[in-house]
């Protein structure tokens, strides 16, 4: 069995206690990937100290030079894309086509962040006094804690790590305990590309390692992606310790299909949105809102097509849907299927674990469709994070929007319609950070802001130009070249 380590100040090391945990393949639990350090406070302390020590030099490195390293990271990700995708699928299950897309997003993010190092624009603004120059410039925030989920094990950490590097921050990265090998492979690439020792430190482990990082006095900011429950707990600690915090959390994303929609296009979209990554995406389509005029036809099309999806090891050609991540996820999905039935929804497809044909040691679950779902039902409200789609029937655009907005989450949303008025109204009416018109609820691009409203987010965005506002502090600078003491609000105003 392979043994993997933390990376602190450029050195690969075990946890101080020597404790470890194991990562296994969710498609075949007899396939063990390796052991990883179960880190505790002492390991986090060492990693934070290394990041703090590396900060002055990295901050002082001209941003375009940091950009050169980011471009090399993009090049190495490109070279290793195929091998990385295989390793990712082995560890977290989604198909290789999807893990290749995950790596591509990281590549795009690397080149985008590299290009931003030649911008990182500030502002110059006229002064209210003569012979005085006003400007606002960006400075790095400092030492950042990066805590991420496992479902986009390369793309999501890079949404945070690359802009943080571009802006001159140092960091401690704690990947999910479900995808630690992906974390190792990513940090190896960063070092091979020339990121100096101590600028990025890797600490493995679960919730306790994350908790130490969040509570640490010498960490300036936390950027988190994960569940709303964990995010809220992190937000509380960051509030008490006065840390800047970005929270990207759960979703319960609606797709509306109107009576004038292109149904074949909508069908392709919902299959990809609901069952891609086995429904384990923050942006997964988990609620399908159908206009009554096309409801029955579309449900027939959907159940027939979803039934034909092939489940298996995502590294095998022809597989559409991989496994759930672990036993707990399997139990959680089974629980929600039972609750859906108890509360009166109709199980139109799936609803059970899939075994046989080499799938006995994996966490496979059939694509599942519930019809006759009403907004008050548990399966209409809670994030299931599995291949379970709830279908609602509505009689108007207004009712569709009411159902779509009837959730505590607000990440992604979608409407299929040929009606330009409904398209443009939906952009404003849907309470979500992202709206797709005639596309499913997934498909983020690296150079666009990504994040949500309500219980999905806390006002920040990963991705795009907006993430640089999180990873930089504004410094306001006044230069008085008048040679005199000039008093703002006094010398320039007549009483
Ligand atoms: P999770 O909240 O269980 O874990 C996320 C990370 O937080 C892991 O690294 C975990 O070890 C760490 N953690 C757990 N408890 C902690 C604590 N008390 N303090 C600090 N760190 C702690 O989430 P998960 O099961 O890994 O991922 C699934 C969730 O992530 C879903 O809700 C999904 O919607 C969400 N997600 C959101 C986005 C987004 O950008 N909005 C993207 C991907 C996933």
Image: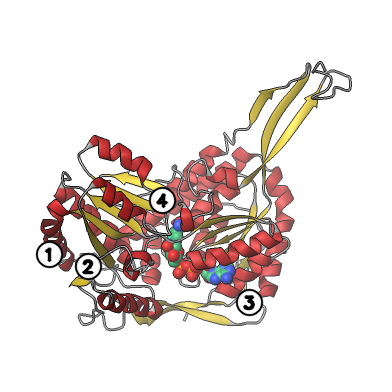
The answer, for residue 479, to whether it is visible in the render is yes
User: Which residue was labeled with disc 2?
Assistant: 369
- Give neighbour class at mark 2: few <14, some 14-19, many 20+ (Cα, 10 Å): many
Residue at 63% x, 82% y: name it.
Answer: 18
Residue 268 percent across, percent down from the top left: 20, 54
User: Which residue was labeled with disc 1?
Assistant: 304
On screen, residue 261 above or below 223 = above
Residue 185 percent across, percent down from the top left: 49, 63
- Observer-nearest of 338 and 183: 338
Gap in Å between the C-alphas at discs 3 and 2?
A: 44 Å
Q: Earlier in the sequence, mark 4 or mark 1?
A: 4
Gap in Å between the C-alphas at discs 1 and 3?
A: 50 Å
Residue 237 percent across, percent down from the top left: 65, 64
User: Which residue was labeled with disc 3?
Assistant: 15
Within 8 Å: ligand 1 and the Cβ of disc 2? no
Q: Earlier in the sequence, mark 1 or mark 3?
A: 3
The answer, for residue 184, to whether it is visible in the render is no
Gap in Å between the C-alphas at discs 3 and 4?
A: 31 Å
- Give neighbour class at mark 3: few <14, some 14-19, many 20+ (Cα, 10 Å): many
The quarter of the picture where the C terminus appears is: top right
**For residue 279, side relative to residue 170 (left or right):** left
Gap in Å between the C-alphas at discs 1 and 2?
A: 11 Å
Q: Do labels 1 and 2 touch, CB within 8 Å?
A: no
Residue at 36% x, 69% y: name it.
Answer: 384
């Amino acid at each position: 069995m392979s043994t993997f380590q933390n990376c602190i100040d450029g050195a690969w090391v075990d946890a101080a206690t020597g404790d470890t945990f194991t990562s296994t393949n969710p498609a075949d639990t007899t396939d063990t990937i390796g052991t990883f350090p179960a880190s505790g406070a002492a390991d986090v302390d060492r990693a934070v100290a290394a990041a703090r020590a590396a900060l002055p030099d990295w901050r002082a490195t001209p941003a375009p030079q940091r950009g050169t390293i980011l471009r090399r990271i993009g090049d190495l990700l490109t070279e290793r894309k195929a091998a990385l995708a295989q390793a990712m699928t082995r560890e977290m299950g989604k198909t290789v086509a999807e893990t290749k897309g995950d790596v591509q997003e990281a590549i795009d993010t690397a080149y985008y962040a590299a290009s931003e190092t030649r911008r990182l624009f500030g502002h110059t603004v006229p002064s209210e006094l003569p012979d005085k120059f006003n400007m606002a410039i960006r400075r790095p925030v400092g030492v950042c804690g990066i805590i991420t989920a496992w479902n986009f094990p390369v793309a999501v950490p890079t949404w945070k790590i690359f802009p943080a590097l571009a802006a001159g921050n140092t960091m401690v990265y704690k990947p999910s305990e479900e995808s630690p090998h992906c974390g190792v492979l990513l940090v190896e690439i960063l070092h091979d590309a020339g990121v100096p020792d101590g600028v990025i430190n890797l600490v493995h482990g679960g919730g306790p390692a994350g908790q130490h990082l969040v509570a640490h006095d010498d960490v300036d900011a936390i950027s988190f992606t994960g569940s709303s429950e964990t995010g809220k707990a992190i937000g509380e600690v960051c509030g008490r310790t006065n840390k800047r915090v970005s929270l990207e959390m759960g979703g319960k994303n609606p797709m509306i299909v109107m009576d004038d929609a292109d149904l074949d296009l909508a069908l392709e979209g919902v299959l990809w949105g609901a069952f891609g990554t086995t429904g384990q995406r923050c942006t997964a389509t988990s609620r399908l809102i159908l206009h009554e005029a096309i409801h029955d036809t579309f449900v027939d099309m959907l159940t027939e097509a979803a039934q034909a999806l092939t489940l298996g090891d995502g590294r095998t050609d022809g597989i559409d849907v991989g496994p759930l991540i672990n036993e707990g996820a399997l139990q959680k999905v089974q629980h929600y299927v039972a609750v859906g039935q108890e509360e009166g929804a109709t199980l139109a497809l799936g609803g059970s674990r899939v075994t046989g044909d080499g799938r006995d040691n994996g966490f496979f679950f059939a694509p599942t469709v519930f019809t006759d779902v009403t907004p008050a039902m548990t399966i209409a409200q809670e994030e299931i994070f599995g291949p379970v789609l709830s279908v609602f029937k509505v009689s108007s655009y207004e009712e569709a929007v009411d159902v779509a907005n009837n959730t505590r989450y607000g990440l992604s949303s979608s409407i299929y319609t040929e009606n330009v008025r409904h398209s443009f109204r939906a952009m404003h009416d849907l309470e979500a950070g992202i709206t797709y018109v005639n596309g499913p609820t997934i498909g983020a691009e690296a150079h666009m802001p990504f994040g949500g409203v309500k219980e999905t987010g806390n006002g920040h965005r990963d991705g795009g130009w907006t993430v640089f506002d999180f990873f930089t502090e504004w410094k306001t600078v006044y230069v008085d070249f008048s040679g005199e003491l000039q008093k703002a609000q006094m010398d320039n105003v007549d009483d």
